Image (cartoon, grey):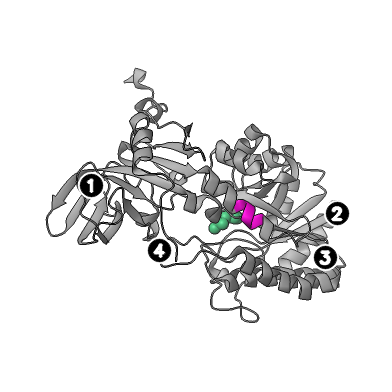
Amino acid sequence: MNTKSLPFTEEELESIIATHPTPFHIYDEKGIIDNIRRFIKAFDWAPKFKEYFAVKATPNPYIMKLLQKEGVGADCSSLAELLLCEKIGLTGHDILFTSNDTPFCEYQKALELGALLNLDDITMLQYLVDNGVETFPDTMCFRYNPGSLKEGGNDIIGVPEEAKYGMTREQIFKAIAFAQKRGVLHFGIHTMVCSNELDVNGLVGTAKICFDLAVEIKNKLGVIIEFIDLGGGIGVAYRPEETPVDFNLLSKGIQHEWESTLKSNGMSDTTIAFECGRMVTGPFGYLVTTAIHKKDIYRHYIGLDACMANLMRPALYGSYHHITVVGKENAPLDHIYDITGSLCENNDKFAIQRTLPKIDIGDRIVIHDTGAHGHAMGFNYNGKLRSAELLLHDDKSVTEIRRAETYDDLFATLDFSHL
Ligand SMILES: *Cc1c(COP(=O)(O)O)cnc(C)c1O
């Protein structure tokens, strides 16, 4: 269970809206910090434990900076994300570059920043050589795709053989040998087979897959894996009846595998890392909107001033996002609505047939858990503008950490002068 409460009162929200018109995403700074501290603390047994925030979740430098102060690095998969790291002064092994289908210019930037490269495919080694990389960095990480999890797998972990990511087991061995010939001295492995996973067993299963592979690499190649990256995938309890992942339980499960596999095979100094994004910011973001229209046909519709350009997860994945009608938290849930945006797309709905209190025009409608893959997935279809992002501080003051787009932004790539 989780309460789906708001980090502000109705009055506080109205005073924010007085200077920042809806719609906007607002992030709860204290919520983010407390959560990441709890996560890191849960792994205090793990030597050199490191979390790399998956920047794609909330690619905002203020959020990244907040996390940087907590000792969190950045997991990047594109040039833009690397550039954001550069802007906030994150460099070297504080950046993990876990990309795929990567153009060379992106590797070039990653190398220039001294980022830890996590290669998605064995062909990337030759690709680097072919593009003139003479000297490889002294540390490299390789992404492992365990394929069909016949032995040792479980129902919770998905179907990695259908995923485009990572290398086969044999390719991992070949990649290490290739890299050794190019002077690479330190090796890491990575796997990520879960997404939005709330079951600790699936996440512990990922660790076991990696730890077992590290032992096999040691036995077969005599190479000590010094860095194990367990990817992201820790879920968010989007529904009130779901329970967030218990970090201590997760940590205990991984520690158990670590002791029986890594530690007992002489790899107790190996760094354990995560690349979590969703759980770091997801539950601490709120899309604040206003109900602007009401429509009664075969169903009852509430039209918001936001649309799927502000949050596309419901339309893209059919995801549930909890909705609070501000000031009506205790009102009876006696209406059923589809909550819509204004795109000319029938899937532009934040909720379908949702039981809610009676909504009136002008009500503030807050959509929960939009802190990851919310604003970040924004787009401009129908010429909709992306909203502002606000950071709510503990003292309830607010910093605008990204302004809303304007029509000048939207048309910036058009040259009207040749018409
Ligand atoms: C998306 C992604 C992550 C983050 O996953 P979450 O589910 O947000 O924790 C980490 N690593 C890679 C390579 C990813 O693509």
Q: CA distance from mark 3 to mark 2?
A: 18 Å
In the rendered structure, which amino acid carries the disc numbered 2? Leu
Query: Badge 2 is on which residue?
Result: 185
Specify which label sits upstream in the sequence, 3 or 1. Answer: 3
Query: Badge 4 is on which residue?
Result: 240
Q: Examine the rendered structure and indicate whether residue 319 appears above or below residue 344.
A: below
Q: Which region shows up in magenta?
A: 36-40
In the rendered structure, which amino acid carries the disc numbered 4? Pro
Q: CA distance from mark 2 to mark 4?
A: 48 Å
User: Between tags 2 and 4, which lies in front?
Assistant: 4
Figure quadrant of residue 11: top left
Specify which label sits upstream in the sequence, 2 or 4. Answer: 2
Q: Nearer the viewer, residue 313 or 300?
A: 300
Query: Badge 1 is on which residue?
Result: 303
Percent from the top left, x then y, of residue 207? Answer: 68, 68
Answer whether residue 220 is visible to the viewer in this image.
no
Percent from the top left, x then y, of residue 209? Answer: 68, 71
Q: Nearer the viewer, residue 129 or 207?
A: 207
Query: Badge 3 is on which residue?
Result: 268
Number of marks in picture: 4
Callout 4: SS:
loop
Q: Is residue 121 left or right of residue 140?
A: left
Quarter of the N terminus within the rendering? bottom left
The residue at the point 66 percent across, 53 percent down is: 51
Specify which label sits upstream in the sequence, 2 or 1. Answer: 2
Q: CA distance from mark 2 to mark 1?
A: 58 Å
The residue at the point 38 percent across, 57 percent down is: 321
| Crowding at mark 4 (Cα within 10 Å: few <14, some 14-19, many 20+) | few
